Structures are given as C-alpha cells and as structure tokens.
Amino acid sequence: MMDRKYLITRMDGRICSFLMDGHKTVEIHCDPAETADYALESIYIGKIKNIAKNIGAAFVEIAPGVVCHLALDDMKQPVYTKKGSSKLPQAGDELLVQISREGMKAKYPSVTTRLTFHGKYVLLTTGKGKNSVSSKLPKAEKERLLSVVADRRKAAAYSWLFRTNAGGAPEELLVRDMERLSARYEAMMAHAQYRGCFSCIQKAPAAYLRRLSNLYDSEAEQILTDNRDLYRELEVYLGEYQPEDLGKLSFYQDELLSMEKLYSLETQLSEALRERVWLKSGGYLVIQPTEALTVIDVNTGKFEGGKKREEAFLKINREAAAEIARQLRIRNLSGIIIVDFINLEEDASRKLLLDEFESELRKDPVRTTLVDMTKLSLVELTRQKRERPLSEQIHVRISGALMNEGTR
C-alpha cells in the first residue's frame, strides 16, 4: 500500500518541505521563512537596459540595480507597456517579464516575455502558441485533453499546456482550472496598463506553496504540517488554487513524538548534503558539484560479486542509476551532469543500463535528458535549471565530516 506524504515544517529558521514515499525521501526544498523579493514566477514591468547582440541577449532591469538576462530568441510576442520608435527591442523599452530562473552564484536571474500561469492540471502561456499535452501521457489521453480545448473559444492571446496531472482528470476539474487561470490572466493584463516601470504586477506565492501544483496526484496522498501558521497558509492556498486537494491537508500533533523525529527529517537533510552515498549492494556514489558541471562517480566499494565480473558490475550500475535519478531530484542538481559508471564490456549490458537509467530519469518532473555514453564510457545528461541546488538553498556551513563522509 502506498504511503506518500508531502511534509512541510520549520527547521532552523527555514521552511523545509519533504516529499516522502514511506520513509524514503523523494524531494527536499528549504526556503527562507520570509518570501524573497524577485521570486521565481513573479511578473514585473521591466526596462531594457541594453542589448548584447553578440550573445543574443537583452539585459532588463526589474528594479533599480536588479538586472536580469533575457534571451532575444524569447522576444517573439512581448507585451510592451512603453515602446520606443523602433519595431525591434531597444534600450528604454518597458515590457512585461516573468522570472524564469533564479540567479545562481555570479549569474543573473533569467526572465522571459512568455508569461506562464500554473494550475494543477494546465498551464496558460501567453503568445499565439499551439495547445499541447505532456509527452508522458498516452496518445488517446492527449486527444481527449485537446478536445477539451477545442470545445472552448480559442484565445488568441494565450495557449494551453496540459500537465501530466491532467491524465485521467475529469473534464469539470480541467475546465475549472482553465477558467481560474484565464481570470488571473485577464485581471493582470487589465491591471498592468495602469502601472509604472519596475512595478511587480504579480508576486508569486511562496515557493513551498507554489510547489503544491507540481505534485502529481500519485505522488502525495497527504499534505502534512506540524505548524499552525503554515497550516493556515496551506489551507488558504489550496482553497483558492487547488480546492480538490483540501481533503489531503492534515495537521500533525503528537506531544510524545514530533514529526521531525518520526520521519527523521534532520537525518534526511544531512544525508542529502553528503558527498558519498552508499548503495545497498555495498557500492557507493561520490557526488561532486563544480562550477561548470556535476560529476558522479560509481564505485564498487564493499560489494563482493564473485567471479562473474560483468554481472556484478551491471548489478551495481543498475542500482546506482536508480539512486542517481533520486539524488538529482533530492539535491536539485541541474545543468551538465557526467556519470562515471563502472565499465561494462558487453554492448547488451550497456544498453540495458542506459534504458533503465533513462526510465528512472523520466520520473523526474524537472526536464532531464540523457544525452549519450561517450567513448570513455561516461554518461552525459542535462537537467533543467530553475531553482538553486539544495546546498545553496540552505546557506549554512556543514562540517567536513558531514559533507564528505557518509556511513552505511
């Protein structure tokens, strides 16, 4: 029987959320107790500061001194609130932009002119795009979902994307989600024309609330918190944006055993920051993020596989593939990732490993692509960047022993 919970609690002055499958962690996030300025998905009236054609980018101020990166390829149907004489983008133009990626280390935050409004089942995206459906859904379900849009008036100003969550959802829930997003879009556009440059037209909900729309129904049967203030926030948010999920919300209360102790949350968080991850087989992973990419090394460790080396190495690699997919999501690692699996001699073994690895990566709601295996038997993959990795979210010093040496 499934026992999947989404836990939200306060830990060390932060609001931490844990997606749990039984007592096994699937995802961890740690957010500031106070909602940060310039949060992901917030919408501003920005001003183009300058255009760098050599790198295909514009730099847009969304507040005095707060500069963001905007790809010129993204500016196909921008919504201007103030436009200069040229039809092309130019310095001084004011336009609506949405934060699409947080600033990381020395990199600017990224913004987009394609504004997106998130529902549980659908996304509304501005511009004359094509209605689409998650690639994870079967063909028959895609056709059913697109027929829901076909039965409604086509909006020239925006398009719809049906999320994986929409699979099997009743039409009335889909329509209600669409109507809610349409109303938000119309209200924002009516409001924006009366606001000046640097105005925040729509402030995104706190990250720990916003992520509730990203949970698949199959991933969380219960939303649980042990904090009264958080419970009230969750209740209000779900009532407005996901009323069908209000029944999943529960308050944890046990004077003898705290939620943190029951689910070993502090241990789960500590393990997600360690460099070494042990596997049940006795092998282990070494996970080392660098400035340019993340390197993951698979080692045999204490594994005793006997004389059948190929079979033994394949067993460790298969276990490692599943654990790497889980660790990418838990740690929120992104960008270029290189995995050094234990070398396999047989083509059939390598193919089986890559097929299983790709299958595990597809479970991740963040777009992750397995590129290929190089001639040196290194597996290349990429994972979309949106939020900071867990280690940066926490912003605390971890002792060398905790970071670098795990125990079985």
Image (cartoon, rainbow, N blue to C red):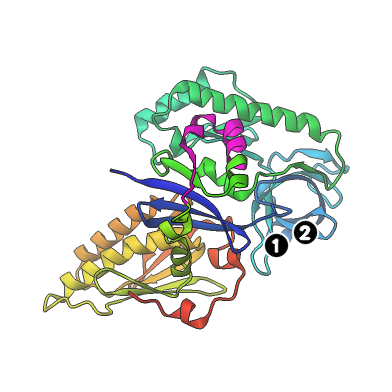
Quadrant in which residue 192 is drawn: top right
Image height of 315 relative to 244, above or below: below
Quadrant in which residue 261 is drawn: bottom left
Q: Are marks 2 and 1 in contact (CB under 8 Å)?
A: yes
**Residue 51 vs residue 237, the one in the foreground:** 237
Image height of 329 relative to 180, above or below: below
Question: Circle 1 is placed at which residue position?
Answer: 108
**Residue 67: image tag:** 2
Of helix, strand and loop, which one carries label 1? Answer: loop
Which quarter shows the N terminus?
top left
Q: Looking at the picture, how far across and down is residue 355, in whole percent?
A: 29, 56
Task: State the predominant SS element of the stretch in magenta.
Answer: helix
Q: Badge 1 local density, few (<14 within 10 Å), some, or many (20+)?
A: some
Can residue 371 be seen by looking at this rendering?
A: no
Say how many tags the image has. Answer: 2
Image height of 42 relative to 321, above or below: above
**What residue is shown at x 46% (from left), y 22% (from top)?**
171
Sequence-first tag of 2 and 1? 2
**404 relative to 66 in the view: left or right:** left
Of helix, strand and loop, which one carries label 2? Answer: strand
**Residue 1 vs residue 330, the one in the foreground:** 1
**What residue is shown at x 75% (from left), y 32% (from top)?**
189
**What residue is shown at x 58% (from left), y 31% (from top)?**
239
Residue type for callout 2: Val
Q: Which residues are magenta?
A: 233-254
- Is 29 magenta? The answer is no
Image height of 117 relative to 364, above or below: above
**207 relative to 47 in the view: left or right:** left
Q: Which residue, as the protein is rendered here, is positioned at the far front?
A: 256
